[in-house]
Image (cartoon, rainbow, N blue to C red):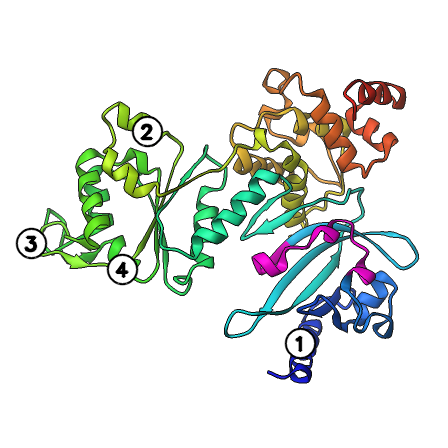
Amino acid sequence: MNHDLKHATLKAVSELLQAAVDPQAALFVVDAEQRVVHWSDGARELLGFSQEAMQGEHCLKGNRCPQCMAGCGVQEISHIDGSPLVLFAADGRAVAVTKFARALRSPDGDFLGAVELLLPRATRTEAPEDRVTFHGMTTADAGMKQIFRMLLNVAETEAPVLLRGESGTGKELAARAVHAESHRRDGPFLAVNCAALSPALLESELFGHVRGAFTGAVRARDGLFRRARGGTLFLDEVAELPLDLQAKLLRVLQEAEVTPVGASMPIKVNVRVLSATHASLRARVAEGRFREDLMYRLRVVPLFLPPLRLRRVDILPLFWHFVDEENSKGIRRIQRVAPDAMRALLDHRWPGNIRELMNVVRYAFAVGRGPELMLDELTPELREPHNRRTGSEADRIRAALTESGGNIGEAARMLGVSRATFWRKRKKHGL
């Protein structure tokens, strides 16, 4: 594709998308060098730069985004979905937006540029965040960003991945990300919870059965290994597999073939296996409850997803992410959080991790109304003082500063203390 045609193609994509979105949205297209090839009327209105002023200029000139100066990541991860940013318009105004982006690539995978969409956010104080969204997972935590990079890299291979983490940390989302980034993306992604079925049912679910194999088997049925052909099979809570099924799973992984229940001949299968567990497989091996040879087959690439209490920088960004999702449904629009409710969110240990945080937001939308989230609209677990985290005052101060965009008065209000007390505590912790 020649240079002019490439630019024309990018502009046409932009114009088609612009016709389908809110006219107030800022939509622009950049080439492989991140120079603007199209700048919509919405972008002019939102950020104050004309199409003529931006044509051929680096996109940073028009969005003046502090986070983006370190790289927006769209070239590396191909898409950004719902990342909150604070940009600065031509007149110096801070503009809160939600960013969506898609990389444009040639048939050979070369980066051609990107289409980016900025939607104005509901009015509330937010700080610029070094935040990345990847296949439904969002983080500002350095460790999680490294995991995103590893998921991208391992997706290019057929290596078995074992995802370790507590309930609610996003293990299935991570598995789906590997599948979506792999060459198997056009095949099925099937998942089974190995702890949710009896051994007999699980064997039939995984390997299938022939007609008459057992009482009630009135017809033959393909198992998940056959139904997932050409795609990915995700074994959640794999540590709970019974020992006899572990032996059969090992054979499937070694020979790439399954024998349905009641059958005498094996059948070849073509599927990638990803697995997850909240328990240590090494500990299960030591207890005699898991085969060591199967463990090594499954955990070629072990990845640990940290609990939310170890990535506290993500609590408020994730909270607002879920709030925005609920806001978009139109039943209620939350724009701010009462100070005592904010303290409860920051103090909670989040034993249920991201899933618990999402459910707390849904609960608040179900039981409350109005633009301010109140303490009595949080789940009982967050309202009970003995369930709150103690001793991490520095984390709460840091989170309040982030949420308030560095505004001392607003940060003090969030924590329910005076400006003088906030200054004293901030100095104490060297923040």
Amino acid type shown at disc 1: Leu
Q: Residues within 10 Å of mark 4 (few under 14, many from 20)?
A: some
As helix, strand or loop, the secondary structure at mark 2 comes to: helix
**Mark 3 or mark 2, which has the lower sequence index?**
3
Q: Which residue is mark 4?
A: 270
Q: Which label is found at residue 282?
A: 2
Q: Which quadrant of the view contains residue 60?
A: bottom right
Q: Residue 361 in the image: x percent, y percent?
A: 62, 38
Report, in whole angstroms, how far the alpha carbon at label 2 lies from the one at label 4: 28 Å
**Mark 1 or mark 4, which has the lower sequence index?**
1
Report, in whole angstroms, how far the alpha carbon at label 1 lies from the one at label 4: 38 Å
Residue 195 in view, yes or no = no
Report, in whole angstroms, how far the alpha carbon at label 3 lies from the one at label 1: 57 Å
- The residue that appears at 23% across and 37% down in the rendered structure is 293
Q: Residue 75 in the image: x percent, y percent?
A: 61, 61
Magenta residues, as a range?
A: 60-81
Q: Which residue is mark 3?
A: 264
As helix, strand or loop, the secondary structure at mark 3 comes to: loop
Q: Which residue is mark 1?
A: 10
Location of residue 417 with respect to 405 vertically, above or below? above
Query: Residue 369 lies in magenta, yes or no?
Result: no
Q: Residue 44 in the image: x percent, y percent?
A: 84, 67
Query: Residue 63 lies in magenta, yes or no?
Result: yes
Q: Nearer the viewer, mark 3 or mark 2?
A: 2
Left or right placement of residue 337 versus residue 247 in this view: right
Kindly check if marks 4 and 3 are in contact, taking CB atoms under 8 A apart as contact.
Answer: no
Q: Residue 273 in the image: x percent, y percent?
A: 32, 50
Kindly check if marks 3 and 1 are in contact, taking CB atoms under 8 A apart as contact.
Answer: no
